[in-house]
Each structure stands twice: as structure tokens, then as C-alpha cells.
């Protein structure tokens, strides 16, 4: 199963509309389809009728949902149950990323969800970033998490939908060959990454079996651009899953080990994790970042505290995003959700300033374009 996929753009259903089929659900471990749509000129069409996640990467869309026209600019993300969407109008230059489920039982959610990044970035409290996670390496916008009712993979697991930007790697800790890279090993999940905006020189490589803590062998570097997807598809229990001693000496599964390089620019992508993370990440600069297996997270006191803190922000994001999409945002400025939005923005800004204070000038410059704007 290929790890790196190039978009092949084909004519869409309407003149001026192109689409690229990236992943088919039948042969992939997640059991989901993934595609991108692009409008070279203004078009009127209809979206897929299957349950789906839809993100506006560029441009502007008006989508009729149950008779309500939703205004969806860049940075809008939706979950649509099967059959809920009507007409779709896209202005010239619009780009969409879509992930869809072929079977009705994979539609976990029963209601439409609209989330705009203006409000997702304001989810922070008590010194913690809850959805808009900035690190020295990347910005991760956690649009849909494990508890959000969207799609299920074919194994019945909730999936996540993240919008991530990885920064220039200059100055990051080196790999075994002395080269600065992003280091990741998602041992409890598969992931596919739809790259839609790549600037500078970017590439990815995958570890070769057998996996090793020292002396790892690697496959070739694959160039990344705005028309590539890289897929970490070593599924749980598969022939390639291996057990290696962890820091505590106990044998643990090792899967999907990879490195990404970005020089003179950045890599922005939409990605799916299966199963979805809870939002709590193990990120250690210099090590291979991972998420804890979800079965070790759910039900723990730390996770329950995280959910309690996040819950009111979920209400804020959903209500204000819907108001923005329906032209009712001005009426929300006296609401408790608007006050929570403003407080969350200030908390996020404080976290970002604290992060910058601990970085050298090079890393501060790399993060600069992605900081919370006024």
C-alpha cells in the first residue's frame, strides 16, 4: 500500500470544477474516502450525500443545509450527516478537502456541526491550550476530537480531523544523521495527511522494518508539495506491527515511524487519525512524538478533567461558528459564549507569549506568522 500519493485532478460534475480522488474507502485501514475539490471559476454543484467532513481551504462557499444557507469562508470546517446538504455555491479559487464514510453505520453524528477557526483558536484556560496547540515545531488546530460526534472508521473507532502546519525545521533537534527534522511515531494510530499548501523544500521518509531504537534504517525521502498525501497506514495487529522496549523496559508496539523536513517554508495539511486522539499529546522535543493509546486515556482522572475544562469551549465554538455562518454573529456579542471567546483568546495569547520567551530568535521567527492575530 503506497505511502505517498499524488493528486490526479479530473473534471468535476460541473464546468470549472475539478476533483482529485486521493483515498478510496475499500482498500484503506480507516475505511474512509478522501478527496479534494477545486473551483477554477464560480460554480453551482451539490456535495456528496454520504456523511462527511468538509473543510474550506481557500475561497468561499455558500452551502444550503436543511434550507439554511451557510456562509463558509476559508477556515470553516463542517460535519454533515448523510443527506443533509443541498446546493453548494463556490466562488472562483475555492478549494475543499472532504473525507467521507461509505457505510451508514460509520456516521456517528446525527447533527450538523460547523466550526470556524476564529473560535477554535480561543479554546484555552488554566494555562492549557485545549484545541489550538502551538509548539516550537508546529501549529495543530484540533477541529474534531475523539469525543466529537462525527465519523467512525471501519473498525468502529471515532476519528479526528486536524488542521496542522509544520514550520521550518532549522534549529530543531537533529536525527541520528545530524539533520534537523520533525520526529514522529504514531504507534497507536494510522494517519493520512492531505498536504494542500507547501512552501519551500519539504519531504518525508518512513522507517524500514525492523524498527530499532538505535541504528534505524530508513526508506527514501519523498518530496512533498501541495498535491501530495502521505499515509501512515501500518494498522494495529498487522504483519508490520512490532514490539520494542519502551523507556520503562516493557515491550510496546511501534508503528508509523517517520520524519518530515521543511526548509525555507512550511507544510500545511488536513489529517485524520484513527482512532482519534483525545487531544492530550506526548510531545518531547528531540524524541519521536506520539499520542497515548486512547484506551489508556479514556476514563482517567486527567482525561475527565480535560473534558470538563473543554466542554464550555465546545459550546462556544459551535454556537458562535453557527452564528457566523448564518449572519447572526453580531447578536452574540452580549452572550456568555462571546465572553468565553474573548477570555479564551487572551489565555491563548498568554500561552503563546510564554512559549516565545523560551525560544531562540530563529524559532521565534519560524512561529511568527502563525501566532494569534489581533
Image (spheres, rainbow, N blue to C red):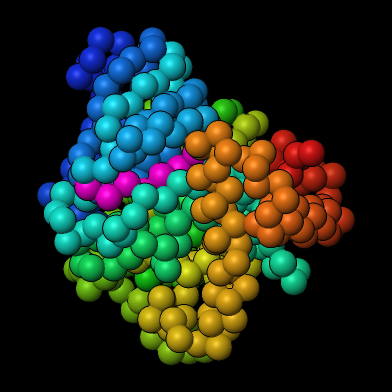
Seen from the viewer's position, the closer of residues 143 and 248 is 143
Residue shown at the point (20%, 39%) measured from the top left: 49
Q: Residue 370: x and y, percent?
A: 69, 41
x and y, in percent, of residue 280 in the image: 55, 70
Name the dominant secondary structure of the magenta segment: strand
The residue closer to the viewer here, 305 or 358, is: 305
Give the magenta part as a residue range. Answer: 76-82
Q: Is residue 205 above or below residue 13?
A: below
**Residue 111 as seen in the image, left or right of residue 134:** left
Q: Is residue 361 visible?
A: yes
The correct choice, above or below, for 58 with respect to 302 in the image is above
Residue 366 coordinates in the image, percent (x, y): 72, 40
For residue 141, say whether it is visible: no
Residue at 25% x, 10% y: name it.
Answer: 15
With 4 as the anchor, is 326 left or right in this view? Answer: right
Q: Quadrant of residue 266?
A: top right
Query: Residue shown at 38%/36% (left/top)?
Result: 68
Rendered image quadrant of residue 64: top left
Q: Residue at x 21, y 43 (%)?
A: 83
Q: Is residue 78 magenta?
A: yes
**Which residue is more in the foreground, 271 or 225?**
271
- Left/right placement of residue 263 relative to residue 126 reads left
Camera-side residue of 340 and 263: 340
Number of disc labels = 0
Left-right relation of 336 to 374? left
Q: Quadrant of residue 41?
A: top left
Height in image: 26 above or below 314?
Answer: above
Task: Residue 246: say if magenta.
Answer: no
Percent of width and height locating residue 315: 55, 61
Amino acid at each position: 500500500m503506497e505511502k505517498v500519493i499524488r493528486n490526479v485532478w479530473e473534471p468535476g460534475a460541473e464546468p470549472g470544477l475539478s476533483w482529485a480522488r486521493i483515498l478510496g474507502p475499500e482498500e484503506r485501514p480507516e475505511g474512509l474516502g478522501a478527496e479534494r475539490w477545486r473551483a477554477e471559476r464560480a460554480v453551482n454543484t451539490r456535495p456528496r450525500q454520504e456523511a462527511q467532513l468538509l473543510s474550506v481551504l481557500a475561497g468561499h462557499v455558500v452551502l444550503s443545509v436543511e434550507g439554511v444557507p451557510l456562509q463558509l469562508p476559508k477556515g470553516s470546517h463542517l460535519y454533515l450527516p448523510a443527506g443533509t446538504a443541498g446546493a453548494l455555491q463556490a466562488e472562483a479559487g475555492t478549494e475543499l478537502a472532504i473525507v467521507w464514510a461509505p457505510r451508514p453505520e460509520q456516521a456517528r453524528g446525527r447533527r450538523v456541526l460547523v466550526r470556524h477557526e476564529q473560535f477554535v483558536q480561543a479554546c484555552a484556560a488554566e494555562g492549557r491550550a485545549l484545541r489550538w496547540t502551538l509548539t516550537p515545531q508546529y501549529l495543530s488546530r484540533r477541529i474534531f476530537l475523539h469525543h466529537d460526534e462525527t465519523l467512525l472508521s471501519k473498525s468502529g473507532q471515532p476519528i479526528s480531523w486536524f488542521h496542522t502546519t509544520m514550520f521550518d525545521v532549522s534549529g530543531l533537534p537533529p536525527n541520528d544523521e545530524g539533520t534537523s527534522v520533525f520526529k514522529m511515531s504514531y504507534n497507536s494510530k494510522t494517519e493520512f495527511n492531505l498536504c494542500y499548501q507547501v512552501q519551500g523544500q519539504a519531504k518525508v521518509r518512513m522507517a524500514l522494518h525492523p524498527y530499532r531504537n538505535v541504528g534505524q534504517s530508513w526508506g527514501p525521502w519523498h518530496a512533498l508539495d501541495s498535491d501530495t498525501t502521505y499515509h501512515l497506514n501500518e494498522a494495529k495487529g498487522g504483519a508490520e506491527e512490532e514490539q520494542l522496549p519502551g523507556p520503562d523496559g516493557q515491550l510496546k508496539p511501534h508503528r508509523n515511524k517517520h520524519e518530515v523536513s521543511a526548509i525555507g517554508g512550511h507544510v500545511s495539511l488536513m489529517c485524520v487519525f484513527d482512532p482519534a486522539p483525545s487531544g492530550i499529546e506526548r510531545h518531547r522535543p528531540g524524541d519521536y512524538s506520539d499520542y497515548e493509546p486512547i484506551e489508556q486515556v479514556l476514563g482517567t482522572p486527567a482525561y475527565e478533567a480535560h473534558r470538563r475544562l473543554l466542554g464550555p469551549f465546545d459550546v462556544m465554538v459551535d454556537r458562535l461558528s453557527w452564528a457566523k455562518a448564518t449572519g447572526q454573529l453580531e447578536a452574540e456579542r452580549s452572550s456568555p459564549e462571546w465572553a468565553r471567546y474573548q477570555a479564551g483568546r487572551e489565555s491563548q495569547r498568554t500561552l503563546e507569549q510564554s512559549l516565545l520567551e523560551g525560544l531562540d530568535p530563529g524559532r521565534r521567527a519560524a512561529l511568527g506568522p502563525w501566532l494569534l492575530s489581533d
